[in-house]
């Protein structure tokens, strides 16, 4: 499905860019795909696809990453503090 008519980007293009380079912003997604935002109408949809891709990547993570509820970015298991048992 085409999500950006200005740059003719599909949802598959966005998911591939997320898998290859883990962009943190919609601007980085455009850059990864060799273009730049034009009208900006697709930005919200691209962000939604990015969030879905990050959640899927975290769920599939072999080392048990969690997803930050604020940023939507994966948190490596080793970065999650162990509970204080003292
Ligand atoms: S629809 Fe994506 S920049 Fe216009």
Image (tube, rainbow, N blue to C red):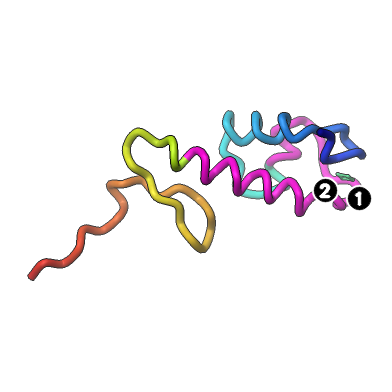
How far across and down, in percent of the image, does residue 71 sit?
Answer: 53, 58
Q: Dot 1 lies on which element?
A: loop
State the predominant SS element of the stretch in magenta.
helix
Single out the mark in the foreground, 2 or 1.
2
Q: Residue at x 69, y 50 (%)?
A: 47
Q: Give ligand 1's quarter of the image.
A: top right
The x, y position of residue 68, in whole percent, is 46, 57
Query: Mark 2 and 1 residues: CB-CB less than 8 Å, in contact?
Result: yes
Which residue corresponds to the image point at 49% horizontal and 38% vertical from the top-left?
57
The residue under label 2 is 42
Q: Which residue is mark 1?
A: 39
Compared to residue 21, the image places residue 78 above or below, namely below
| Bounds of the magenta segment | 29-57
Residue 66's spot in the image, x, y percent? 39, 50
Query: If the image is split into quadrants, where does the C terminus sit?
Result: bottom left
Q: Is residue 80 left or right of residue 18?
A: left
* Residue drawn at the location 57% of the way across and 31% of the way down: 19
- Residue 34 forms part of the magenta stretch: yes
Question: Under 8 Å from ligand 1: the CB of mark 1?
Answer: yes
């Amino acid at each position: 499905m085409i999500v950006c008519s200005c740059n003719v980007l599909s949802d598959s293009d966005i998911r591939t860019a997320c898998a290859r380079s883990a962009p943190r912003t919609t601007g980085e997604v455009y850059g990864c795909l060799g273009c730049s935002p034009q009208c900006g109408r697709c930005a919200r949809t691209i962000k939604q696809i990015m969030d879905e891709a990050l959640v899927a990547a975290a769920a599939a993570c072999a080392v048990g990453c969690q997803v930050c509820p604020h940023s939507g970015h994966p948190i490596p298991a080793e970065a999650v503090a162990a509970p204080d048992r003292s």
